[in-house]
Amino acid sequence: MRRVATATVAVALGLSLSACGGIDRAVAEDGGPVSVKVGIIPIIDVAPLYLGVEQGFFEEENLEVEMESGQGGAAIVPGVLSEQYQFGFSNTASLLLSVSKGQGLQAVAAGAATTGESGEDFGAVVVPEDSRIKDAADLEGKRVAVNTLQNINTLTINQAVRAGGGDPSTIEYVELPFPDIAPAVAAGDVDAGQVVEPFVTVAEQQGNRQVTSNFAAADPLLMVGLYFTSDRYAQQHPEVVAAFTRAMEKSLAHARRDPEKARAILDEYTDIAPEVQKNIVLPDWPEKIGIGSVKRLALLMAKDGITESPPDTAKLLP
């Protein structure tokens, strides 16, 4: 079910105030707030966006924000390119892949990052309690379920296996939706599965255990997701993009400072059971984009053959 949240934001007069130390702002043609749609996936990662709307950070920037749930990044990217959405959220690898194909996208704000802590991250590879798989290297030659082939989860698992001394080229990846991965692991249909919260907590509550925190293992500062817009929209509406970025940075900082408020806002747009929600590990929400980790992902994409050469991060990063 689509959930919509709105916040009234106004971007004050479209005058350049830079000469007197101010900020360029804009208003809609009718003199009111600027309305923007943000294509999102209703997952834990986007909690700061909802929190920022609730806290009035977008209203302070004179933006009226509407969130629309999309069927994953594959649908959100073309939605942003066509300006069905003015902004979107997607995982970083998907955005790099789009850029490598010549699609004009521009990151505008950090989205979600690994906590950097093994065993205490929002993404992990899980196995049955009695599995002989004890660490990432043991995934060599195994069947591993992921939600999308040749994307951020396979990239980070491969790097974790590589770092542990294993050969990731021997892994057989099986594509399954996140809700189906833990049951497939329990049934023995696959040897292991990569899941993100709340499915990490659900899997553990069902008796599975973690063998690697693949995001943290790949890069302790990994930028897993980003907010983005199209090059065309950024060129035509720089003041709106700047206002959205400022509001998102305030939202991310607030979520990082008060994670329990971010946890509570999940009630607004997810159906996570209370006994799961209170135990999930939240992502880290840095205020700024971790440029180094985006470049690292680009290198891993070429190493794993997803792209012929590392995508040009300069085309994506602000």
Image: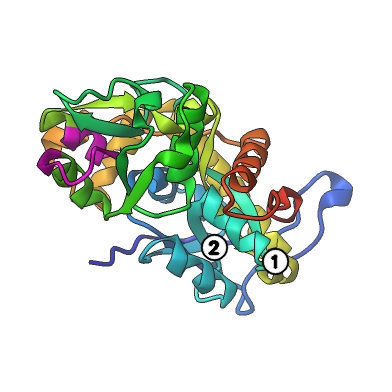
Residue 69 or residue 186, whichever sits in front: 186
Specify start and end residues of the magenta stretch as a single range.
Answer: 186-203
Where residue 223 sits in the image (x, y, percent)? 54, 38
Residue 68 or residue 211, whichever sits in front: 211
Residue beneath the point at 17% across and 36% down: 202
How many callouts does the rendering have? 2
Where residue 79 sits in the image (x, y, percent)? 50, 73
Does the magenta portion include 271? no
How far apart are the two marked residues, 2 and 1, measured between alpha carbons? Answer: 11 Å
Tell me the element at label 2: strand
Q: Amino acid at mark 1?
A: Asp
Q: Which mark is residue 149?
A: none
Tell me the element at label 1: helix
Q: Which mark is residue 87?
A: 2
Residue beneath the point at 27% across and 55% down: 177
Q: Which mark is residue 231?
A: 1
Residue beneath the point at 10% across and 43% down: 187
Q: Are marks 2 and 1 in contact (CB under 8 Å)?
A: no
Where residue 56 sits in the image (x, y, percent)? 45, 48
- Using residue 3 as the reference point, say whether residue 102 is left or right of it: right
Q: Amino acid at mark 2?
A: Phe
